[in-house]
Amino acid sequence: MPIDFKMPVQFHGIFSTIGFFDVVDILIVAIILYKVYELLQDTRAITLVKGILVLLGVTMATSLLELHAISWLLQHVVTLLFVALPIVFQPELRRALEHLGQGKFLGASGLLNDAEAQSVVHELARAVKQLSKTKTGALLVIERDMGLNDISATGIQIDALITAEFLLNVFIPNTPLHDGAAIIRGKRLIAAGCLLPLTENRSLSTELGTRHRAAIGLSEQCDALIVVVSEETGTISVAENGHIMRHLDIETLKAVLQPAFAPPQRGIRDFVRNWRLKK
């Protein structure tokens, strides 16, 4: 005997009013929210967002329970908080606006094709291996989707093809470029001796020196990948999204660097671009 399933009247009324453009509207909002979540993921801002949601939830609960004094106080706190949001989320807002301005908010394409990416990663790994062996301090900043012209402007402009030998010359001790960071864009080194912002995270280990704190500081503000070679121990580290991975070997370093130069295809635009590069 077939089951006669009847949709509740309320749901039937709601679904009967949804048209094609309503579905498109919902999908666009969902994509935007997902992209915002991607920007906030693995950053300190995601913790702040959770705190704001908890505060809003408590505010609603006190209002429903008619706790007038606490409700009044929390409502004013929430109002002040929304005024302060542009300051609290300044790095994330900057990142989102730069993605939007560069046309990369809905997706990013790789800077190089596979062959070029492998060549650059090989040269970087050779240079880092030698720097680590000789315990020569170094900072290598790999630009990704967000431009780093403001950072490169603090150093000396170079614009040269990347080779291991060239990078070793850049970081020769007691030279003008040794203490700063080298900025890499695609297969070219665009500047060296650049200054990076230091992190304000006070929970970091005391073992981390100025180079490591500068690498973490920049990674908190943009999507760059920063390679650090310790001058004291020769340890190889990589900073990304406010986090640092330490004690990497060369093979692990290559695996971390490869996606920064040739990300996997994410859509038709990337497929067409890679097809054109192979022609």
Image (cartoon, rainbow, N blue to C red):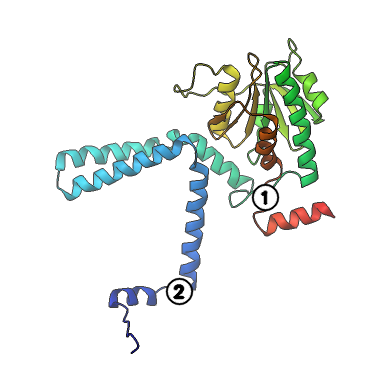
Crowd band around label 2 with a 10 angstrom C-alpha radius: few (<14), some (14–19), many (20+): few
The residue carrying mark 2 is: 19
Based on the displayed image, in which of its 4 quarters is residue 212 positioned? top right
Q: Is residue 176 visible?
A: yes
Which residue is depicted at the point 38% across and 74% down?
15
x%, y% of residue 252? 66, 34
- Front position in the image: 209 or 82: 209
Question: What mark, if any, has residue 164 been given in the picture?
Answer: none
Helix, strand or loop at label 1? It is loop
x%, y% of residue 129? 73, 25
x%, y% of residue 138? 68, 20
Q: Is residue 36 above or below residue 126?
A: below
Q: How many marks?
A: 2
Which residue is depicted at the point 48% across and 64% down?
25
Question: What mark, if any, has residue 264 been given in the picture?
Answer: 1
x%, y% of residue 163? 81, 29
